[in-house]
Image (cartoon, helix red, strand yellow):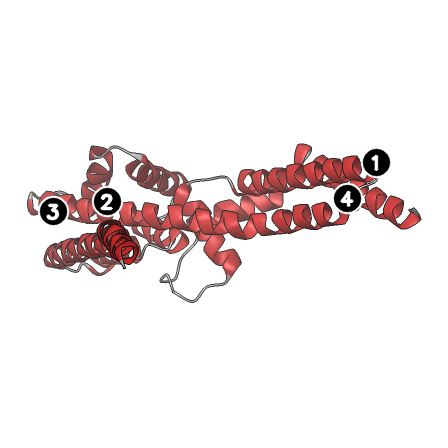
Amino acid sequence: MNTAVLLLGAGTGTGLAMIASALWPTRPTLAGAVSAYRADTAGASAPRAGRSGSEQEAGDIACLGLDPAAVHQRRTRTQTWLVAAGLGLALLLAARGSTAWPLVLLAAGGCALAVPRLAAMRLHRKAEAARADFRYVTGTIADVVTVDLAGGAGVEGALEAATAAGEGREFAALRAVLNRAHLSGQPVWEALRAFGSRIRVPALFDLGGVIGLSATEGAQVRETLTRRVESARASDLADVEAAKAAATEQMTVPIVLIVAAIVLRLIVPSIVAVQNTI
């Protein structure tokens, strides 16, 4: 009985501490906010595939335009309610003399520990869909920039006009990136490269690189952008075909099960009738 009281007391204290941390989260420091702003406007490297879990999650959060503190607070709140519910049920079972309360505590603790992993997987799936949208938007912007350059517009003016012509979260995010670049005195192509690296969209990173070459080296980017647009369209078409093939494969198993059920529904009564006549 003393062991049960100690365990329940320790669990209750842990749950109350988690509730307190979820309700009154630590405010970000000024140094942290400045570092985050510098990370948004700093130079970038090309997105790479092999990244750690924290880097991948940071890229997913940035791609979706979420607040990292709000994301972690939401996870902590979910863990808190799971632990609190488990503790409450365990206390109720212990008060009634049931011996199942340790299992309830273990189940609640296991679910609370699984919350970050499950939330990260769900966040990554949503971020991959958002990255696909950013790739489509990048191809559209490159296409519009190519047309504007053919009409005699400047590189920065063509880029600003292309981002201002579209609607949606992706275009709004790119306009915000360009506005921050103007306010900080950073070249717009470097801002695009940094943003593409941060959200892990190589097409956007490459677009910033091509525009930067045009502005700094005087390179003719019209033909390069045209090739990039054609390549982006081919990549988008391949993604659509792959999605259609995946959907077809997913429908194969249900169709097979339905056909098997129909065949069994037709064959089984005949087999039973034959056996009854023997």
Residue 265 screen position, x and y as percent: 26, 49
1 or 4: mark nearer the eye: 1
Three-letter amino acid code of the residue under disc 3: Leu
Determine contact: label 2, label 3, CB under 8 Å: no
- Lower sequence index among marks 3 and 4: 4
164 relative to 24 in the view: left or right:
left
- Lower sequence index among marks 1 and 4: 4
Three-letter amino acid code of the residue under disc 2: Val
38 relative to 162 in the view: left or right:
right
Q: Quadrant of the C terminus?
A: bottom left
Q: Residue at x 50, y 39 (%)?
A: 67
Three-letter amino acid code of the residue under disc 1: Ala
3 or 4: mark nearer the eye: 4
Tag on residue 95? 1
Element under disc 2: helix
User: 163 or 65: nearer the eye?
Assistant: 65
Q: Residue furthest front?
A: 278
